[in-house]
């Protein structure tokens, strides 16, 4: 619907207007300001148009260049169907015609081709927007240097049309009472509500619902069914902005270099930003609004102990973001029992450390066990009692309770997934998303602008080849002929439906495959480089003249190597994120959903390998392929592969896991999220202050303040950091039972940190409807399955749990663990060292060393098959493999049993959904019966009157009228 130009002429002298006495033109806002009307309160600091009535639903921002030279009158053509109002306190200039992209009242000297091209494309795009019924208002007289804004308002008829097209579910007038639980469950729920009342947010929408409106996809023909008692709030702000965004995405600008939609215009720099406004300020002295309420009850660290107001988050940000925070809240709640059990397991290890016989034997100075050197030439023999502290610390995590905790965490992961599915179903019912998939199937997804551009490029190439083939080539001047073909193709309207095939994407697929393999290979190379660093550093420290440095070689090498791994992981995480996005872009996925899923898969694959490769090395490869004294495995022919400590590699795995996990959470998840946005905001502030020193003291409008905020980059980084943390909690939990506790502490801060970022640091994102968390659910489920297998191998091969059981039940002479340490150490005759590998200086001992010990199951040097693998080795290996098979199948069965026994949909929700369907059928039946009764009444009246009077009447409920309305509707919405 075209709107009229709001423009007033004011004469400053009583004489009639002449060329020397032109009228002074002002807008409505300036007139109201001159009459003393408070425009600041009317516009609410930029939340409305200049008339103070129409809400600003969306903002388009662009940059332009100002010229200080002489200006000449513009000769542009103007549109008469646009609305441009200048604001009171602003110097917005408008041309007499009020064109859709008239930037100044007097045009500037021509700047350059690119600026003119951008201005032309903005003109055409904004004109097309107004043809769809949107109303626009420009503001270039802002307090921001060189930045103009286009405010967009969607009138009622546009909102109704698009809501019907998007199949938005809106509340009807039909209200029903939600059935409450009776008996014992009702009493338990009442008690729980009273207990949890202090930790509930002070938000009205968070209270338990007792009544609910029936919802139905909006239809203009059935407006009388919907609850329109308050039209201003029928479509809330996030719904209005999402409707406008849908129009912006599908509105084309084909005349100007084939631009398609707002995403293409943003990519080409025609507009610098496009975003919906926040509802207002969030400071203490501002007017009450949803943003301030969320800031007080959700984004404050002082309410960390309270539940999240998820319904208000959904109202403000939409379902997709609300589902992320709901999932994060459920995950954090489920970490509480896991943390308690992990603490109990750790305390059990602390309580039983003095009863652990193997560690007591290792710490006993009377055993006098001399161990073989850890490196060639420079390393001396050493006493096993020197590893006493490591052995005692290993027992804190390597004890029988660890096996129980691994089983518990596998069942915990299955229970968490089932609990989330039930919670998600409850939210779907409350937010009217139970039939979301069917509704989405009726609405066609818009192709991405990049995909359409690629298809258009392909079509133009085909058309160019066809014309080139049918037109004869002049022999004298081929270049002129090609130019004529290109000119003839200009303005060709392509009718053939094109699409990208696998042949078009083959180069991109090949690049993706090679790129991912290269990145994974680079990760492995870096881990190998850290291994070389560990080996070379250990050899260098062993040659040190400082006794303390020689005695702390293992601790120093482990700590520095883990820190290097952490720094590399943090750097590569950022690099891999950019590479994954670039690899996805060159694939040119058709829809946004496909693009997001492919991006998530690539980013997760690269970041998973990056984060867990060092941990996998310590857990499953370190100390496995080292050889034996006299026959070691060397790197580059000179460096020996590093060995595990006598107590095993589990302690080092625990150190590696804890430092990487805590480092990522502290540095990447918290400091980066807080520091980088603050730094960018400071840079923008300093830059704007340098351009306009007085700008910082002026009061900006809402859309100007939002322009200074960071753009929303999607939920992929937020989900990614939580999924990687979920992997730390589940994959290697057998080596670090305190991982759930540290994850819980981090998430308590993470929820409020993310909330504060969304409220105060980011532009308001466009609300997106979603029924679930998408591909992330499958990733979490996959990690839970893999965690069972990995923990089985950690218990079997990394810890000493299986060797201890084998010794206890097969080789122990008295049925106890006495003698286990001696049983796991093999003998080596020092005379069998290869030339040049024996220690140059023997350890200062009271006796000469003839036999040293090393950890392995091998025959003694005085046996016939000296240094061969013993039968005990094969017995232990068979027990380890058997444990992996039994543990994996048992835990998988128990997880599937938990999955089966817990229904995905709560029984009360299933009953309510069924009840809603029955009530909706009753509503439509009642409406049809009312129509039939009125039709029969009208027929009876016609029978009592004369035939000619009946023919002159126009019934309101005739089928022909409804049919014509339906046909007219189909013509209107056929896009």
Image (cartoon, rainbow, N blue to C red):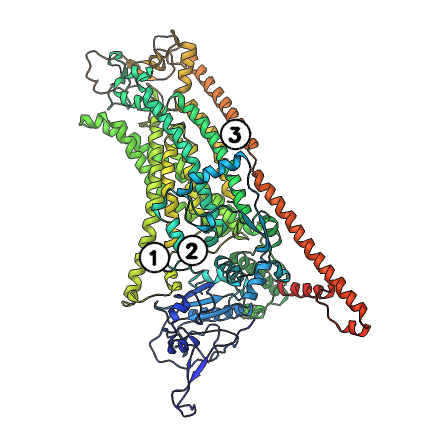
**Secondary structure of residue under mark 1:** loop
- Please tell me the numbered disc located at residue 283: 1
Residue 210 falls left or right of residue 740: right
Quarter of the image for residue 52 reads bottom left
Q: Write the residue at 75% across / 66% down.
A: 938
Q: Nearer the viewer, residue 168 or 656?
A: 168
**Disc 2 packing (10 Å; few <14; some 14–19; many ≥20):** some
Picture quadrant of residue 944: bottom right
| Residue underneath mark 3 | 895
User: How far is the residue under mark 2 from the one under mark 1?
Assistant: 12 Å
Residue 709: x and y in percent read: 37, 58
* Residue 47 x %, y %: 42, 64
SS type, badge 3 = helix
Residue 101, numbered circle: none
Judged left or right of residue 97, residue 962 is right
Instruction: Give the farthest residue toward the bottom.
Output: 15
Of the residues under marks 1 and 3, which one precedes in the sequence?
1
Which residue is the site of mark 2?
A: 290
Query: Residue 144: percent from the left, percent from the top?
Result: 35, 67
Task: Name the foreground residue: 116 vs 501.
Answer: 116
């Amino acid at each position: 619907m075209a709107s009229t130009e709001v423009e007033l002429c004011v004469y400053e002298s009583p004489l009639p207007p002449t060329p020397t006495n032109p009228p002074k033109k002002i807008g409505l806002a300036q007139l109201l300001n001159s009459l003393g009307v408070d425009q600041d309160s009317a516009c609410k600091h930029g939340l409305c148009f200049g008339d103070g009535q129409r809400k600003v639903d969306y903002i388009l921002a662009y940059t332009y260049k100002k010229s200080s030279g002489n200006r000449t009158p513009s000769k542009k053509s103007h549109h008469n169907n646009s609305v441009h109002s200048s604001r009171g306190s602003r110097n917005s200039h408008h041309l007499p015609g009020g064109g859709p992209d008239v930037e100044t009242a007097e045009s500037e000297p021509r700047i350059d081709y690119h600026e003119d091209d951008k201005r032309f494309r903005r003109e055409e795009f904004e004109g097309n927007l107004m043809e769809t019924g949107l109303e626009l208002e420009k503001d270039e007289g802002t307090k921001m240097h060189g930045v103009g804004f286009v405010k967009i308002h969607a009138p009622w008829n546009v909102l109704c049309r698009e809501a019907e097209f998007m199949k938005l579910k809106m509340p009807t007038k039909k209200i029903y009472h939600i059935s409450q639980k009776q008996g014992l469950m009702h009493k338990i729920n009442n008690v729980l509500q009273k207990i949890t009342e202090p930790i509930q947010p002070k938000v009205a929408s968070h209270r338990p619902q007792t009544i609910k409106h029936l919802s139905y996809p909006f239809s203009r023909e059935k407006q009388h069914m919907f609850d329109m008692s308050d039209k201003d709030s029928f479509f809330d702000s996030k719904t209005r902005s999402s409707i406008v965004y849908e129009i912006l995405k599908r509105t084309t600008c084909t005349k100007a270099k084939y631009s398609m939609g707002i995403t293409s215009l943003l990519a080409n720099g025609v507009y610098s930003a496009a975003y919906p406004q926040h509802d207002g300020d969030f400071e203490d002295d501002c007017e009450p609004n949803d943003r301030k309420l969320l800031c007080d009850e959700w984004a404050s660290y002082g309410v960390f102990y309270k539940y999240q107001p998820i319904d208000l988050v959904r109202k403000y940000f939409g379902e997709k973001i609300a589902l992320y925070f709901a999932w994060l809240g459920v995950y954090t709640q489920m970490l509480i029992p896991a943390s308690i059990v992990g603490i109990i397991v750790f305390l059990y290890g602390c309580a039983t450390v003095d009863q652990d016989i193997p560690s007591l034997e290792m710490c006993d100075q009377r055993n006098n066990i001399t161990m073989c050197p850890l490196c060639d030439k420079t390393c001396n023999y050493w006493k096993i009692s020197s590893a006493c502290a490591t052995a005692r610390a290993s027992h804190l995590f390597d004890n029988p309770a660890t096996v129980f905790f691994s089983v518990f965490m596998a069942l915990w992961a299955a229970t968490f997934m089932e609990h989330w599915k039930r919670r998600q179903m409850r939210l779907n019912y409350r937010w009217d998303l139970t039939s979301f998939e069917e509704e989405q199937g009726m609405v066609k997804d818009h192709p991405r602008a990049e995909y359409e551009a690629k298809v258009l490029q392909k079509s133009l190439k085909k058309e160019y080849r066809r014309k080139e083939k049918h037109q004869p080539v002049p022999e004298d001047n081929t270049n002129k002929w090609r130019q004529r073909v290109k000119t003839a193709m200009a303005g060709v309207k392509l009718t053939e439906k094109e699409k990208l095939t696998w042949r078009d994407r083959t180069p991109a697929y090949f690049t993706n495959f090679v790129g991912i393999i290269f990145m994974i290979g680079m990760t492995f190379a870096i881990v190998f480089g850290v291994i070389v660093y560990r080996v070379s550093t250990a050899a260098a420290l062993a040659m040190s003249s400082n006794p303390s440095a020689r005695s702390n070689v293992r601790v120093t090498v482990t700590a520095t190597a883990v820190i290097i791994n952490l720094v590399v992981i943090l750097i590569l995480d950022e690099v891999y994120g950019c590479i994954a996005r670039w690899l996805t872009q060159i694939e040119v996925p058709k829809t946004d959903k496909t693009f997001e899923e492919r991006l998530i898969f690539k980013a997760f694959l690269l970041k998973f390998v990056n984060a867990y490769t060092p941990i996998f090395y310590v857990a499953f490869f370190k100390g496995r392929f080292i050889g034996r004294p006299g026959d070691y495995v060397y790197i580059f022919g000179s460096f020996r592969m590093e060995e595990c400590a006598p107590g095993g590699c589990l302690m080092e795995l625990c150190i590696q896991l804890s430092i990487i996990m805590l480092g990522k959470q502290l540095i990447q998840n918290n400091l980066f999220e807080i520091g980088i946005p603050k730094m960018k905001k400071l840079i923008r502030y300093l830059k704007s202050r340098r351009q306009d020193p007085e700008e910082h003291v002026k009061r900006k409008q809402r859309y100007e303040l939002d322009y200074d905020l960071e753009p929303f980059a999607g939920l992929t980084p937020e989900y990614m950091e939580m999924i990687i943390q979920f992997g730390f909690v589940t994959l290697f939990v057998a080596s670090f039972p305190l991982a759930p506790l540290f994850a819980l502490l981090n998430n308590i801060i993470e929820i409020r940190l993310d909330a504060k970022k969304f409220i105060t640091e980011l532009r308001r994102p466009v609300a997106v409807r979603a029924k679930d968390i998408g591909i992330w659910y499958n990733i979490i489920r996959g990690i839970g399955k893999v965690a069972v297998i990995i923990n089985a191998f950690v218990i079997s091969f990394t810890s000493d749990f299986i060797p201890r059981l084998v010794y206890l039940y097969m080789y122990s002479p008295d049925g106890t663990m006495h003698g286990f340490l001696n049983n796991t150490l093999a003998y080596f005759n020092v005379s069998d060292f290869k030339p040049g590998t024996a220690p140059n200086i023997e350890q200062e001992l009271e006796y000469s060393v003839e036999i040293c010990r090393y950890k392995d199951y091998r025959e003694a040097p005085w046996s016939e098959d000296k240094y061969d693998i013993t039968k005990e080795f094969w017995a232990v290996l068979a027990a380890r493999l058997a444990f992996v098979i039994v543990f994996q199948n048992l835990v998988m069965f128990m997880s599937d049993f938990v999955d089966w026994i817990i229904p995905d949909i709560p029984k009360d929700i299933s009953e309510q959904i069924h009840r809603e369907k029955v009530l909706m059928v009753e509503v439509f039946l009642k409406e049809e019966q009312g129509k039939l009764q009125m039709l029969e009444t009208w027929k009876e009246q016609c029978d009592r009157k004369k035939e000619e009077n009946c023919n002159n009447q126009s019934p309101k409920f005739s089928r022909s009228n409804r049919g014509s309305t339906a046909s007219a509707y189909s013509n209107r919405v056929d896009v």
